[in-house]
Amino acid sequence: MSKILKTGIIQQKNTPDAADNRSRIAEKAERLAAMGAKLIVNQELHDGLYFCQTESVDNFDQAVSLDSESTEFYSNLAKRLGVVIVTSLFERRAPGLYHNTAVVFDADGSEAGRYRKMHIPDDPAYYEKFYFTPGDLGFKPVQTSVGKLGVLVCWDQWYPEAARLMALAGADMLIYPTAIGWESSDTDEEKSRQLEAWVTVQRGHAVANGLPVVTVNRTGHEPDPSGATNGIQFWGNSFVAGPQGEFLFRAPSDTEVEAVVDVDLGRSEQVRRWWPFLRDRRIDAYGDITRRFVD
């Protein structure tokens, strides 16, 4: 049976000014709500620049508590528009303890739930281990008025285990706020391989779990404050895939985008009947999956 969820996505270029970024998100959210969106998904760390290009203790000043001006802003926005909003914030949990946290606000403005990013990269221009403590909330979907949302964050999208655990916990869809892009020294061929690998692995999560996937990335160039690299050209390409990995929407790489996509949550049931991957899992034989390496 069809169950359409009008899903809004916001692909945005960010500035160093958090108030400006929030204001532009609100303007886009208002337009999406006017177009019928009931769920709006933002990109990773959408209130500012992607500060993880360098390691600086001063950047911790950007973190916010989960009862801050920022969370109040998005709570009020969700309530005013009557929509569910997925946000992505730099959480100050306690002095010296910080997380990369997705907070979901329900249509009445209440906090429906949160997810702390579990997989934390530490690569050139993505020095996230310096800033973020790995999440401790597990892979638990957030129950909202529009469904059970399997919210994960960016680097999590490369891990089929994370998607599977969200699916096994009853998620109706998988959602990935993201910040990822190219380093300018890479060849065009390498850039294409990276982008398509990123898209392909997430479409694979949709197929393997019989669930829609919503991925929202930022766009635009952000310089490296240290000058060690040429900065990151965020590659956009936010997309929505159905439960067979089919594209329902794909954004361009280099422009801001706001769009409403019809996602049929009811279709997963039929797809899973055709392709009963959950039925045929050999749960008796997967014990080694929790080992670092089988040797």
Image: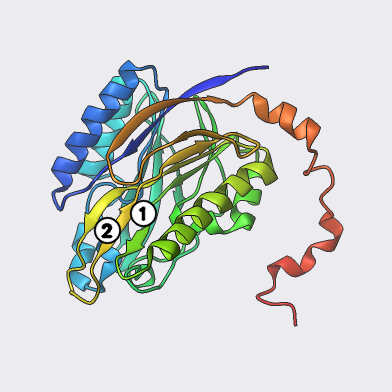
Label for residue 179? 1
On the image, which quarter does residue 80 sit in? Answer: top left
Kind of residue sitting beneath label 1: Ala
Residue contact between numbered discs 2 and 1, judged by CB atoms under 8 Å: yes
Instruction: Kindly state the secondary structure of the residue where label 2 is placed.
Output: loop
Dividing the image into 4 quarters, which one contains the C terminus? Answer: bottom right
Label for residue 144? none
Q: Is residue 223 above or below residue 137?
A: below
From where the camera sits, is residue 168 visible? no
Q: Residue at x 62, y 55 (%)?
A: 160
Kind of residue sitting beneath label 2: Tyr
Q: Is residue 83 left or right of residue 54?
A: right
Residue named by callout 2: 50
Q: Is residue 114 left or right of residue 256?
A: right
Image spot of residue 251 (x, y percent)? 39, 38
Image spot of residue 115 (x, y percent)? 46, 49
Q: CA distance from mark 2 to mark 1?
A: 7 Å
Q: Residue at x 26, y 74 (%)?
A: 55
Q: Residue at x 53, y 57 (%)?
A: 197
Q: Is residue 127 above or below residue 264?
A: below
On the image, which quarter does residue 210 sit in? Answer: top right
Image spot of residue 121 (x, y percent)? 43, 68
Q: Is residue 264 left or right of residue 289?
A: left
